[in-house]
Image (spheres, coloured by chain):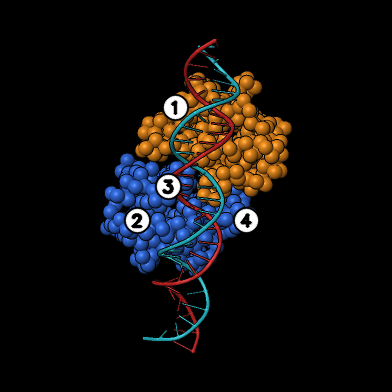
Chain colours: A blue, B orange, C red, D cyan
DNA sequence: CGCCCATTTGAGTTTAATCAAAAAACGTGG
DNA sequence: CCACGTTTTTTGATTAAACTCAAATGGGCG
């Protein structure tokens, strides 16, 4: 939350470069979004609420956020994360109304992209469209993996898998290094992701800590035993498709 | 599984027309896919296996299928359904390898679409691309709803919600009418969708039956008390976005 | 008809939820 | 920098939902 302030788009570019090698012009196109109005928002605020009209795509510049859905009786479930550099699904072209809400975890900075801005970005720059399509597919893969977790993994497995996923995603945008990454979720939020009660999250974390596998304090996750964590969570990073480094495509305009 | 055999593409068209009104040329473009090789497959067979190279998009012409993922120890979870008219996510353009498998529930007929065929379909026909984009978003919304179900709904709520979802999706392709629809899933498959054991599925079905809410026999689901089913499942069809009938767009080429 | 698969049922167990309360950490204003 | 209130985390005891194991029943198909 401090480093990338200076290079506001580095997260997005770093991520997209896992999917396609970007040319100078591509990068300039992304930087061009800088002209869009940038906004700040505090932690624990709704960015978008279910039922809102969809007029802009949100590009998260820094901070953590999440999508969530609620049942009538107030039970709520986090259905996805939103990390720096993530472009909230650009359903702006098709859907009129949000069917879920987005809230911040930390204070955040974001840009609102008009339909026009997104259109320019993807129509003019084929490679960018390719990279963004890739991202959509990866997001779908992440959702499938969450369904698998919720359906079949135990509490311990589920949380281990989640730590692995988020570590990899953060590493891909340069926010994780040497098995340490920011991790600003409260245990209540961890409970809302994992479908567990917050008390059970606490107990489960204790187990992972007791076995010397992770250390999670003051908003930082430190993975002490990555192999064990992967094994418990049955984590295989392949579905994130972050290992391509866009090597197949060259970056000449 | 009998009616639509005669009009092989009606399901896909019916579905897409919920998203955009299609012109004659659009429909011809879809019918043009008929030239692609059509294949038959028996019930309970893998159509695509995790790790397979992605060379074709699959268009299911009739029959039911599902996507699933497995853990190393064999636990498996259904992560999505695939109904007549569904075009399996055309990741053909970006991903090289399947990260999940697809299997049939019933005997099925399908077409394999080459990259080229899909490209023609969506590049030439803007409205079709629009409709297909819409479908991708609806699929993402369905996945979010599943995550909510698995995370927060009880066994009874979860199954009720699933019945509502599938009824609506089947109705949208003309396979459901008067609260009756085909429902060829075994209880074991229902268990693999809902994250429950098959025994618990059986008990939960008994409850729904006992309250006179549904009747599920010999592959047919009959919803006796739709309002009660919706209320139990906290189902709101809005997220399926099937209520537009593409009215906003006219269908002139 | 008989075999195999799917479904049902029961009993006992396990996992995770709930309820309740204490302890720790955090943020803010004095 | 400390005291205060708030939020978050931890812990224990109890309960409930769903699982497992086991066995019986039922249906469909060759």
Helix, strand or loop status at disc 2: helix
**Residue at the (47%, 63%) spot, across then down:** A105
| Residue position for label 4 | A73
| Residue position for label 1 | B46
Q: Are marks 1 and 4 on the same chain?
A: no
Q: Can residue A137 be seen by looking at this rendering?
A: no
| Left or right: where B20 falls relative to A7 | right
* Residue A187 percent coordinates (x, y): 45, 61
| Left or right: where A107 falls relative to B207 | left
> Quick one: B16 or A33, which is closer to the camera?
B16
| Left or right: where A18 falls relative to A101 | left
Q: Residues within 10 Å of mark 3 (few under 14, many from 20)?
A: some
| Residue position for label 3 | A154
Numbered badge on residue A208: 2
Q: Residues within 10 Å of mark 4 (few under 14, many from 20)?
A: few
**Front: mark 4 or 2:** 2
For the residues labelled 4 and 2, the Cα–Cα distance comes to 32 Å
Pointer 3 with pointer 4, Cβ within 8 A: no
> Quick one: A212 or B16, which is closer to the camera?
A212
């Amino acid at each position: 939350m401090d480093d990338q302030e200076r290079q506001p788009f580095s997260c997005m570019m770093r991520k997209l470069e896992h999917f396609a090698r970007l040319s100078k012009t591509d990068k300039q196109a992304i930087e061009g979004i800088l002209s869009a109005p940038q906004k700040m928002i505090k932690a624990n605020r709704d960015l978008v609420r279910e039922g809102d009209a969809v007029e802009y795509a949100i590009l998260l510049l820094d901070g953590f956020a999440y999508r969530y859905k609620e049942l009538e009786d107030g039970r709520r479930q986090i259905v996805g994360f939103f990390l720096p550099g993530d472009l909230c699904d650009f359903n702006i072209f098709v859907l009129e109304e949000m069917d879920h809400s987005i809230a911040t975890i930390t204070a955040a900075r974001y840009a609102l992209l008009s339909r026009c801005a997104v259109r320019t970005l993807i129509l003019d720059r084929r490679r960018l469209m390719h990279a963004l399509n890739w991202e959509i597919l990866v997001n779908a893969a992440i959702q499938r993996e969450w369904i698998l977790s919720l359906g079949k993994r135990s509490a311990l497995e589920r949380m281990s898998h989640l730590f692995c996923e988020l570590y990899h995603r953060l590493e891909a945008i340069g926010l994780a290094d040497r098995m340490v990454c920011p991790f600003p979720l409260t245990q209540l939020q961890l409970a809302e992701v994992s479908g567990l009660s917050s008390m059970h999250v606490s107990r489960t974390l204790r187990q992972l800590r007791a076995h010397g596998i992770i250390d999670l304090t003051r908003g930082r996750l430190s993975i002490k035993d990555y192999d064990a964590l992967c094994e418990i969570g049955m984590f295989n990073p392949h579905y994130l498709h972050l290992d391509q480094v866009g090597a197949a495509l060259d970056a000449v305009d």
